Image (cartoon, rainbow, N blue to C red):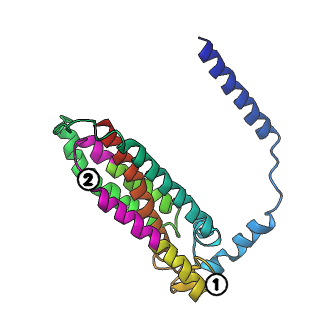
């Protein structure tokens, strides 16, 4: 009872804080200097229809590299901690009785989920979406396969290779921007293409594809480590 009262009090206090912020919020009458530059120059500078994607991948691309690095370290730490107890966990169980409906649905949905994830990060420069969202969707396909068959063995080497190659290629594109264009992760190392088409915005689609593969591999590694721990 006391724990519930404390939790309710904390939620009520947090609600009051957000209420005060909402009541005191006054929108700016105009864009600030940075936002105005992005709004006016993104299309000219990057050729991307999605301003948010252009900011994430090019203007603040180094910060995005830091984010995927943090995610990689998280996946590595989870794997290191959880694998410590696998040696004494005993033999792995056989196929778990999860039901024919789940197995049939998994065979149908996993390819569609992976395809949708690829669509999200390949079209990130045109529509809402991008590498992080597409990678998370691809990882959900891994989660569905693990739910369908928890005892199934997946290749840690393939996941690690995908993550490593994607990360190295991401950094290589960034360095190519410094050598061939105007700076780190400058997307103009590839042709800008026709505005609004899938093959436009220079290297942004390629960068988002690499981010999507990297994030998908890292999330999949975490899910696989947790699944093996449960076994």
**How many numbered marks does the figure carry?**
2
Q: Position of residue 102 (x, y in %)?
A: 23, 41
Left or right: 200 as drawn, with respect to 159: right
Pointer 1 residue = 182
| 104 to the left or right of 27 | left
Residue sitting at 58 percent across and 62 percent down? 66
* Residue at 24% from the left image edge and 52% from the top image edge: 108
Residue 159, how many percent across, how many down?
A: 34, 59
Which x, y percent locates residue 190?
A: 51, 85
Estimate how packed mark 1 is, as few (under 14), some (14 to 19) or many (20 or more) residues with alpha carbons within 10 Å: few
Is residue 5 among the parts visible in the rendering? yes
Measured from the top left, where is residue 12 in percent x and y? Answer: 70, 25
Magenta span: predominant SS is helix
Quarter placement of the C terminus: top left
Q: Quadrant of the N terminus?
A: top right
Q: Quadrant of residue 168?
A: bottom left
Image position of 230 with respect to 142: above or below: above
Query: Which disc, if any, is residue 154?
Result: 2
Pick the front one: 154 or 210: 154
For residue 119, what is the image quadrant?
bottom left
Mark seen at residue 96? none
Instruction: Say which element carries label 1.
Output: loop
Q: Classify mark 2: helix, strand or loop.
A: loop
Query: Which stretch appears magenta?
Result: 143-168
Q: Closer to us: mark 2 or mark 1?
A: 2
Crowding near pointer 2: few (<14 within 10 Å), some, many (20+)? few
Q: CA distance from mark 2 to mark 1?
A: 42 Å
Location of residue 149 (image quadrant): top left
At 70% from the left and 71% from the top, the residue drawn is 38
Q: Earlier in the sequence, mark 2 or mark 1?
A: 2
């Amino acid at each position: 009872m006391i724990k519930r009262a404390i939790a309710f009090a904390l939620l009520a206090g947090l609600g009051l804080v957000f209420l005060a912020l909402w009541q005191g919020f006054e929108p700016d009458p105009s864009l600030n200097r940075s936002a105005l530059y992005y709004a006016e120059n993104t299309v000219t500078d990057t050729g991307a229809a999605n301003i948010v994607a252009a900011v994430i991948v090019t203007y603040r691309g180094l910060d995005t590299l830091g984010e995927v690095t943090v995610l990689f370290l998280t996946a590595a730490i989870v794997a290191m901690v959880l694998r410590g107890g696998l040696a004494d966990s005993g033999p792995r169980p056989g196929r778990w009785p999860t039901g024919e409906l789940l197995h049939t649905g998994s065979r149908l949905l996993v390819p569609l989920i992976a395809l949708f994830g690829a669509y999200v990060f390949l079209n990130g420069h045109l529509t809402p979406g991008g590498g992080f969202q597409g990678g998370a969707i691809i990882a959900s396909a891994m989660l569905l396969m693990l739910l369908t068959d928890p005892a199934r063995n997946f290749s840690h080497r393939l996941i690690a290779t995908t993550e490593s190659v994607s990360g190295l290629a991401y950094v290589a594109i960034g360095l190519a921007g410094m050598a061939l264009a105007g700076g780190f992760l400058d997307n103009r190392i590839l042709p800008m293409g026709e505005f609004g088409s899938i093959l436009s915005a220079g290297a942004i689609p390629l960068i988002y594809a690499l981010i999507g593969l990297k994030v998908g591999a890292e999330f999949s590694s975490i899910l696989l480590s947790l699944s093996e721990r449960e076994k």
